[in-house]
Image (cartoon, rainbow, N blue to C red):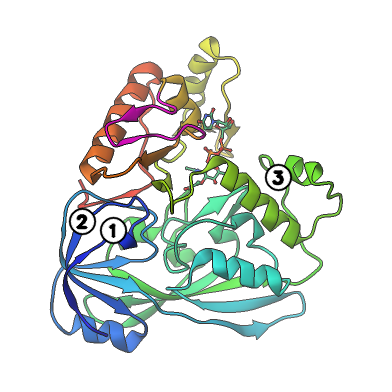
Amino acid sequence: MKILQNVSLLPYNTFGLDVKAENFAEVSSVADLRASLSTGIQPVFLLGGGSNVLFTQDVQGLVLKNKLRGIQVIREFKNKVWVEVGGGEVWHEFVLWAVAKDYGGLENLSLIPGTVGASPIQNIGAYGVELKDVFVRLKALNLTTGKLRSFNHTACQFGYRDSIFKRQEKGKWCITSVVFSLRKSPHRLNISYGDISKTLESSGITKPGIDDISRAVVQIRTSKLPDQAKIGNCGSFFKNPETERAVLDQILETYPQAPHYRLPDGRVKIPAGWLIEQCGWKGKRVGNTGCYERQALVLVNHGGATGEEVKNLAKTIVESVVEKFGVRLEAEVNFWPLN
Ligand code: EPU
């Protein structure tokens, strides 16, 4: 493990922002992590795949890139396995590993960018499945004390794109490994959400396996979301807002077709992409940044954008949605520094 100075983070964030880290190191083991912390350089910023962070300025202190690897079956049951995965493993590579072994539960989460260690932080989710549905526990190293601690399901306090690691424990831990519970065949398939069944049908698949579902999700995501290698972005920039039913009722008066999902507590979730599109942002370009033409929830870097530019666009979008619908969008992406 080597600590480098003045390193560009351009290759390490999917928004393609050219900011510098005062100090930077890649850590491949718990020993590496502890050695880097023993330098006393503060503050420490943990970087996974860099696919959910918006840097608006250079990063002071020490940036650590999580490269802790390894995928291991640690317990075998009749109907399922527990798999422990290093926090630095690439999420989609882990999904492909599971699909190839015929372990089910992750296929709907195919092609989500980022690392395994980052996946519990915002409880990643897509097509009716969330990380919390397959999560058992994680191990994390405290960035102040260097001690390892285990967090079980309850301790993580998962919510919609949320966990304790986005709230009171924010920035305090490096997630070194995560244990998942994956099902053996026969699988429980979840194809009711969004375009999955339509995509399977159009490929002539009537009895899908988890590999078919994974391929269908990859196909849908590739058709809607920009390729991060070509157009910088962080996936959904905002969370889908959860509001009182009365707010939706008012919107339905003018837009009877407004998409929405009922929540168990009587409230409703309204797709932020739809709200943003109605405000006329979809496909709009502002300087080097803009709103993606095929999914308004995704803000993009058309090349050479700064984090500040993206942040300003996000702020303007939030204001216009408040003005038109009385709904305040909340960012899903993490800003650095915080505000
Ligand atoms: N919509 C529009 N205009 C748009 C975008 C969407 O009208 O520009 C409408 C769609 O027609 C649809 C609804 O909004 O009726 C929902 O759209 P979509 O199915 O594309 O999903 P989403 O709610 O925009 C969420 C997640 C995605 C995840 C998809 C599929 C959040 C913040 N985003 O997006 O997650 O892939 O569902 O499950 O919950 C991510 O977190 O980075 C991400 C991509």
Q: CA distance from mark 2 to mark 1?
A: 7 Å
Contact between labelled residues 1 and 2, with CB atoms less than 8 Å apart: yes
Q: CA distance from mark 1 to mark 3?
A: 34 Å
**Mark 3 highlights which residue?**
196
Residue at left offset 42%, top offset 73%: 88
Question: Which element type, helix, strand or loop, lies under badge 2?
Answer: loop
Residue at left offset 68%, top offset 40%: 195
- Residue 35 vs residue 76: left or right? left
Q: Amino acid at mark 2?
A: Val
* Residue 303 in which image quadrant: top left
Tell me the magenta residue range: 281-294
Residue 234 lies, with reference to residue 279, above or below; the image says: below
Q: Amino acid at mark 1?
A: Leu
- Residue 137 vs residue 50: left or right? right
- Residue 306 vs residue 328: left or right? left
Q: Quadrant of the C terminus?
A: top left
Residue 86 at what x, y percent from top left? Answer: 47, 77
Label for residue 19?
A: 2
**Mark 1 highlights which residue?**
10
| Mark 2 or mark 3, earlier in chain | 2
Residue 107 lies, with reference to residue 142, above or below; the image says: above
Q: Amino acid at mark 3?
A: Ile
Question: Which element type, helix, strand or loop, lies under badge 1?
Answer: helix
Residue at left offset 73%, top offset 48%: 191
Does ligand 1 reach within 8 Å of label 3's beta carbon? no
